[in-house]
Image: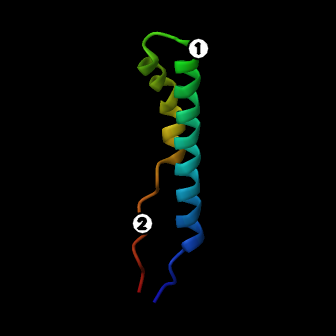
Amino acid sequence: MAKPNYSYEKRQRELAKKAKKEEKAREKAARKSGAPGAEGAEGDAAPADDEVTPQPAQPESN
């Protein structure tokens, strides 16, 4: 039986946390600057989401 790859799962969680933290910082900066339509800044977050997209689990080979 194959061993679970815990380090891969941990790295994916870390990347997701980092992306969420960066998005919150961008939103906070937009609010602080008083920019109207701060929700429009979410379009900048799209490339970051691609980096964090989890890979599908690999099927086990027996």
Number of numbered callouts drawn: 2
- From this viewpoint, which residue is outermost toward the bottom? 1
Q: Is residue 7 above or below residue 11?
A: below
For the point 57% across and 41% down, which residue is it?
A: 21
Q: Position of residue 35 (x, y in %)?
A: 51, 11
Q: Position of residue 51 (x, y in %)?
A: 54, 43
> For the residues carrying marks 1 and 2, which lies nearer the camera in this image?
1
Under mark 2, the amino acid is Ala
The disc placed on residue 33 is 1
Answer whether labels 1 and 2 touch (C-beta < 8 Å).
Answer: no
Instruction: Judge from the rendering whether residue 59 lies leftward or rightward of residue 52; answer left or right.
Output: left
Among the 4 quarters of the image, the one containing residue 5? bottom right
Q: Nearer the viewer, residue 28 or 58?
A: 28
Under mark 1, the amino acid is Ser
Query: Pointer 2: what residue?
Result: 57
For the point 39% across and 73% down, which residue is it?
A: 59
Visual colour scheme: rainbow
Does label 1 or label 2 sit earlier along the sequence? 1
Q: Position of residue 32 (x, y in %)?
A: 57, 19
Q: Position of residue 53 (x, y in %)?
A: 47, 48
Check disc 1: other Cα within 10 Å, few if <14, some if 14-19, many if 20+.
Answer: few
Check disc 2: other Cα within 10 Å, few if <14, some if 14-19, many if 20+.
Answer: few
